[in-house]
Structures are given as structure tokens and as C-alpha cells.
Amino acid sequence: MATVYRITYAVLPASLGPDDYEPSDLETHTDLVELSDPEHAGKVAGQAVRYAPPHSEVKNALRGLLEPGAEPIILKLSLADDA
């Protein structure tokens, strides 16, 4: 199965390297992306804890939405139905 996540990320264009930009100059996007289901990790203080999908899976899904060579910088990841 798959779960829909809301991901907020900045886009590092293909023409820029890590020393060529100010974070405030990058475009920021929020998209809904279908990824693998969260894994249950047990309970902490009575609250269910879940592991998010692997970082590589998230980045690969976002790369599919971007121009070739652009890199996503993940800022926030949450379940789509979370407020």
C-alpha cells in the first residue's frame, strides 16, 4: 500500500552548487506525494510512533517533479491528513 504525504521543500536548480546560493533565494514548494506506508515503531508516552519513509525514497519522488538536475531540499514531511 501507499500513503499520501505533504512535503515542503526548496529547489536547488541544476546550475547551482552548495556554495552558490542563499537559502532564502530558493523556490519553496509544497506537494502531495504518494510514498510507502509509515512503519510503526512502538509507543512513547502512550503515543504511537511511526517511522517515515526512507529519505532516499522521498528525494527520488520529488526529483520526478523537478527539472532534470534540480535537487530537492526537504524542509517538512507530514501525513497529508495531519493538520
Image: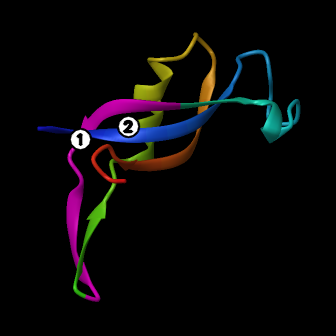
Quadrant showing the N terminus: top left
Q: Position of residue 32 (x, y in %)?
A: 37, 31
Q: Position of residue 17 (x, y in %)?
A: 80, 28
Q: Secondary structure at mark 2?
A: helix
Q: Is residue 59 above or below residue 80?
A: above
- Residue placed most toward the observer, 75 or 14: 75
Query: Which residue sits at x=38%, y=37%?
Result: 57
Query: Which residue sits at x=44%, y=30%?
Result: 31
Residue 3 falls inside the magenta stretch: no
Which residue is tagged 2? 57
Magenta region, residue range: 30-45
Query: Which residue sits at x=88%, y=30%?
Result: 20
Quarter of the view holding residue 27? top right
Q: Residues within 10 Å of mark 2 (few under 14, many from 20)?
A: few
Colour convention: rainbow
Q: Which residue reaches farthest left?
A: 1
Residue 41 falls inside the magenta stretch: yes
Which amino acid, mark 1? Ser
User: Pointer 2 and pointer 1: residues touching (CB < 8 Å)?
Assistant: yes
Which amino acid, mark 2? Glu
How many numbered circles does the render carry? 2
Quarter of the view holding residue 56? top left
Left or right: residue 6 versus residue 37 is: right
Which residue is tagged 1? 36
Q: Is residue 37 above or below residue 57?
A: below
| Dominant SS type (magenta) | strand
